[in-house]
Amino acid sequence: MEYKETNVIRQNQSFWNNAIETTIIALIILTPLAFYPYLVRIFNPAKELVFETLVVISLALWGFKIIQQEKLKFNSSLLNLPILSFMIVCTLSILWSNSPFVSLKELPLFLAGPLLYFIVNNNIIYDKQKINRILNVLLFVGTLFGIYGILQYNGIDFPFWIKNLGRNKVFGLFGNVNYFAEYLIIPLPIAIALFFVSKNKTSKILLLIGILAMGGSLIATFTRGTYLGLGISIIFMFIFYLIIRGKNFIKEHKKIFIFILALIILITFLFALPNPLNKSGTVISKIKGRISIARLSNELSFGRRIAIWKFTGMMINDHLLLGSGIGTFKYNSLNYQAKFFNQGENRSLYPYGIADKAHNEYLQLWAELGIIGLGAFIWIIISFFICGVKLLKKTKDNYKEGLIIGLMGGIIAVLVEGLFGFPLHQPATIVLFWLALALIGVGEGSEDENKEKEINVSQKNPDSNEEERIKNRKQKQSDIDKNDSSIYRFKPLLYLIIILLSISAFIGIIRPFIAQTYWYKGFKEIEKENWNKAIKIYEEALSWDPYLGEVYYDIGKILQNKELYGIAGEYLEKAAKYIDHPDLPLDLYLIYSKKGMLDTAAIKLKQAISYQRDKKSMTPLYSELGNVYLQLERYKPAEIAFKNALKINTKYVNAHYGLAGAYLRQNKLEEGLKELQQVIELAPDSEEANYARDIMQKIAQEKLKTPPTKPDN
């Protein structure tokens, strides 16, 4: 009886584990493949949708399994507590976020990875066959993308991608060459590590094909961060192998290392000495150009990254402990960039840009989650490597040894790339990153395996501990009899709760995606100048996602152009809750000035000035700010505003004319007359010059009418 019950339980577990394995495999295949052309952002939203949906499905299947086996138990791992801590910090950051709705929308992407870890760690990790299947799919998909990247580099691609040029045409299905490279740096080290431990010739050949395909494609992306990440990853994997196997590792693969050494010498020769293979236009010359110190020091993107890192540091200083909230970097970046550019000569020294990522995962985590969130992430990474090293010392299985080293190599590559990019914000890379963290436990024994050993021992020694076994069986049956009625009574309700929660989660995930499809349709109508139709479509988008700030902004702009300033202001103000846009402060200034709200208008105009791309575009806005202060009868701030305009352009007539008005209203007649004379000299035929002459004439007449004062005795 007990044997049959055990078999039924194992069959049920096997069913749910197989179902979960299927969703994990679907996750590995579909996330990098997914894109949808009818979106303003074609690639990432579809990948995020697939990623988050399949994690929800896996989570539901795990819940069904727990109900079926009537036991909730987590497999122990050194990583569990730090990952759980990270999830808690991410979730709680909504409470202190300076844009809670932005944080709420970003949260699913940050939680899906850790949830994937727990799903794999508790349902897949101890089944060698399942792990092999998952790894084979992972490496197969990586190889296919590697081959596709090489084809793209050689101009062989689908017609709708052909317009992409240079290195930017090597983007797989990720929309960006850097995102593609960030994806490849996880499966490639795994393939390299497994290549050295594989004994099967066919497997070795297939792994070599994968290495060449992914490596070739990675080279063709010309991404320096991934070059560095992969290089450091390979060095660390080599060190790990030497520590575990010593000199025997080199002896076992003597031919391979001789070949690699010869290849390094050849590559050094090709790069260092002039030859036909590194002449201008060749792949080698392009790589040399990308990694040269001179190129790095002169390249705009490098200077831009430094600027981003510096104003991210300002964010960190303002929210050192808890951060500004998960996902809020993009909401705060323009404001902090403006503060940074207002310091010294920063606007002249560093390139202007719009940064929705910090180009450094650690700085961005610190800015958004504070030192607590960054500390939790670092705790995860340290625990991962401690776990990996412990398992390397413990395992005697060459395959597991290679897999563990490959997983650590992949994580190292991502961590290095994270210094310069944002791989942990890309859905396909997130999947592989958290999968690697979960698979590191492949060397640990499981509770089920220990039970299986106990069963085997009892079968070999049927007379041992018979009384204890009978006692345990009776106790177990008694517990089942006591709880049977209550458990089976609540099981249907628990199933229903999981189904409803999963449906709710899916609706929460799909709604923003549907909203973005309407955003795309509305954008197409704007291109055709069908303004009213665009507004109707945009309203439909907002019914699906009321936090889509870009749509509020577009509607506000349309209404502003229609001179419907009241309602336009409402939409622009709503947009400001969810996004920041370079033109948004100026748009709000125009709305507030039309409404006569000059104090608020002045605040927005000052912000608009700080958001400008260069000083030249700031000149007319400073002059406009001075005029607003004149209307508010705040003459000293008006004087300062006009002087700021003239610091940038000394010949700006409107600023001279406005400054004259500011001086005259402060009874600074001599300064005012000088500015009026400047207006006449700079633009003698202008309307301002005519006004200046009239004012000067009136001042002269007033002086004649005023009798001279008698000197004091």
Image: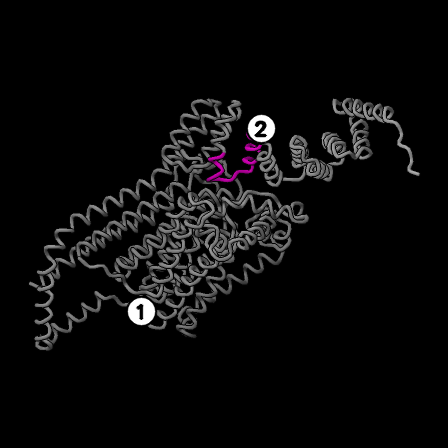
Farthest right residue? 713
- Disc nearer the start of the sequence (1/2): 1
> What amino acid is at disc 1?
Asp
Farthest front residue? 713
Mark on residue 672? none
Asked whether 595 falls inside the magenta stretch, the response is yes
Name which residue lies at 62% across and 58% down.
Answer: 273
Crowding near the residue tagged with mark 1, few <14, some 14–19, many ≥20 C-alpha atoms within 10 Å: few
User: The C terminus is located in which quarter?
Assistant: top right
* Secondary structure state at the residue bearing disc 1: loop
* Secondary structure state at the residue bearing disc 2: loop
Instruction: Say which of 134 and 114 sits in front.
Output: 114
Tag 2 residue: 596
User: The N terminus is located in which quarter?
Assistant: bottom left
Q: Position of residue 59 (x, y in %)?
A: 27, 51
Instruction: Say which of 525 and 396 sits in front.
Output: 525
> What amino acid is at disc 2?
Gly
Residue 46 in the figure: left or right of residue 289: left
Q: What stretch is highlighted in magenta?
A: 573-596
Instruction: Say which of 511 and 297 sits in front.
Output: 511
Q: Position of residue 362 (x, y in %)?
A: 49, 56
Q: Position of residue 52 (x, y in %)?
A: 34, 46
Instruction: Say which of 606 and 6 sits in front.
Output: 606
Residue 492 in the figure: left or right of residue 227: left
Name which residue lies at 36% across and 73% down.
Answer: 393
Specify the quadrant of the image occupied by residue 667: top right
Tag 1 residue: 397
Q: Which is in the foreground here, disc 1 or disc 2?
A: 2
Q: Position of residue 500 (x, y in %)?
A: 24, 44
